[in-house]
Image (spheres, coloured by chain):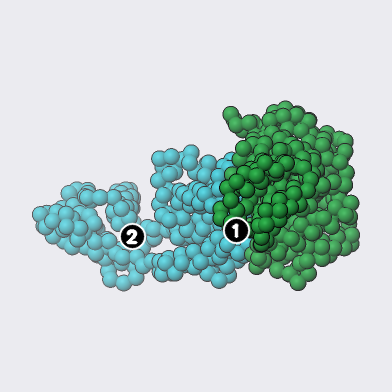
Amino acid sequence: MVINVQNLVKRYGNLLALDHFSLQIEEGEVFGLLGPNGSGKTTAINCILSLLKYDKGTIEIFGKPMRPDAYSIKQDIGIVMQNVAVFQELSVQENIDYFCGLYVKDRQKRRELVEEAIEFVGLQDFRKFHPKKLSGGLLRRLNIACGIAHKPRLIILDEPTVAVDPQSRNSILEGILKLNQQGATIVYTSHYMEEVEQICSRIVIMDKGKTLATGTKEQLKGMIKGGETLTVELFGLKEEQLEAIRRLPHVTGAEYDGTRLTVHCSGGAHNLIRLLDYLRGQELSFGRVYAEPPTLNDVFLEITGKHLRD
Amino acid sequence: MFLHVFTGRLKCLTRDKLMLFWTLLFPVVLGTFFNIAFGNIMNITEEFSPVKVAVVESAGYQQNEAFRQTLDAVSQPGDGQLLIVSVVGGEEADRLLKSGEVDGILEVDGEVRLTVKESGMNQSILKAFLDEYAQKSAAIGKLLRENPQADLSGLLDDMGKESFVNEATLSGAKPDTMLNYFFSLLAMTALYGSFWGLRNSTDIQPNVSALGSRRSVAPTHKMTAVLGDAAASLVLHVAEMLLVLAYLIFVLGISFGNQVGYVLLTCLVGSVTGISFGTFMGCLFQKRDGLKTALLIAVTLFLCFLSGLMMVDIRTYINLYAPVLSYINPAALITDAFYCLYVFESHTRYFLNIGILCGISALFCLGSYLLIRRQKYASI
């Protein structure tokens, strides 16, 4: 096991930031820590990294207790902070070299690692640039390069895509998957459910310092009653037909606004085929049809009664 | 690892233009302004002006021929003129004294009496002149009583020809009170090393900056990082102080005496004090960086004000009314160290200043260590 956190409790005065938070992460996973802002994700990461004191609980990394002076453990950890943490006066190359040098003493080896990191994040054309000359996306990439240049076994990324344009975000996410393919275990915190769904093999959903649910995205979606949502564009649907649709198997609700029919289903298979068969049987012609599977937001909504970004 | 941290830090600091402005360019600019402002004052060769004195016309004055001849001798126009004598009536003499047209009134009534309305340089000269006259006339009287045939001509000839004012330094350097501004300026430069110390402490504490977090999770011992940063800032700041010193000496022509080794030692110790002061402030206050910088500027300037940077007389007042302040104010200690090297040959007072500065630096370092040594934080 790469990370084993048991019953972590952390208080800021009267505020309970982590409430018996537990976490187990296996080698080779891309593990997502998903929760709204203020849910305790960064606090959990800072406790795991031994930056923050905590009131109760145990933390082990690579099977050893994590302490501030556990340098052999720290040697194998890479951290990408939520806030960009680079020196403004150093160039891209110098920044990566500086942080890599805190882990790797051998200069020749370090030079190779720095080059690899620059290529990995695609900053070859910007190696002599200083951070203030870089765009937000490029700056985030530099931030990542500084955290991963020494090829750590465990990489912790704390909301690395905040305030990043979609193109750079995709590039960052692809890079994270590449790091995982190269053998690194990834811990990824975010409040963007799409990102977590896209790259994480296992996810913990947390709120108010508590673990709400843990599992693969399929397992998490399977935990909720709400299933897929079907949308059909059509005209002339009568009230008795709408009632009939509401009585179809697995349908939990249906609305019609004169042009669009929206049907909510709870699990079950072939819901869309069943609905379209009914509409054809009623000789109703329809336009575009959408079927949306449940999202992690639906999971969060059902568990907490609020949206992830509330 | 120390070397890696040191070189990385040195690169960062040498490229920090804003800090370089405050720690190097600002003292140079201020020194230039000082030189322009005080240049004329420093270059003026002070010419001695004869002291104006009123002598009350009286029978005693007319009968005392020796005194009249002496006054004639010292009031002869020329380089050696000591007095400008006006022989007037008693009321006129009082009026002249009250209106400030003369510095004193001499009355001869058996003995010579001096009346002044205030104390000052000219009044002191008159007093010294009369003392000398009284001493020599008494000696002449005694000699004539013992040997009426003695030739005493010329005994009173030298009266007033010796210098009554002589400013000197024990080290032999040319005295100049305006130099204190430049000593204070160098003390300010030394204390501006606190900006480097502040930046060091900001970049190492995870509860203050993201850089601090990143560096704290690296497998580098915290003290290695702290010492590497401190060494880099010390090297840079000592170099800055030497540049400012060289500018003052070689470009502006300011003299710091001839004890070069001790002047350099003062720069080094002043730098250590400045950097340790900034580090301590950075560890003590967990406020925003801008606020801490503003606080540091305010404290540093206040300490420099007390050392005489803006008004040289403030040092005199502090020494008179609150001397303890001079022993706990690093700016005053650095200023006084330069002053001692310039004025005194003995190093007792100099080493007392340096010793106290070392003690203050040690306290700042100890305080910083106690605040920074914690490895986990309650909040970030």
At mark 2, the secondary structure is loop
User: What amino acid is at disc 2?
Assistant: Met
Residue at image mark 2: B159
Image location of residue B209, percent across then percent down: 64, 48
Image location of residue A268, percent across then percent down: 77, 42
Residue at image mark 1: A235
Report the front residue among A50 and B30. A50
Report the front residue among A101 and A65. A65
The answer for how far apart the CA atoms under marks 2 and 1 are is 128 Å
Q: Colour of chain B?
A: cyan
Q: Are marks 2 and 1 in contact (CB under 8 Å)?
A: no
At 73% from the left and 32% from the top, the residue drawn is A21
Quarter occupied by residue B234: bottom right
Chain at numbered mark 1: A
At 16% from the left and 54% from the top, the residue drawn is B98
| Residue B235, label in figure | none
At mark 1, the secondary structure is loop
The chain drawn in green is A
Which quadrant is home to the C terminus of chain A? top right
Image location of residue A68, percent across then percent down: 77, 38
User: What amino acid is at disc 1?
Assistant: Phe
Residue A87, compared with residue A196, is above or below; it is: below
Chain at numbered mark 2: B
Report the front residue among B161 and B114. B114
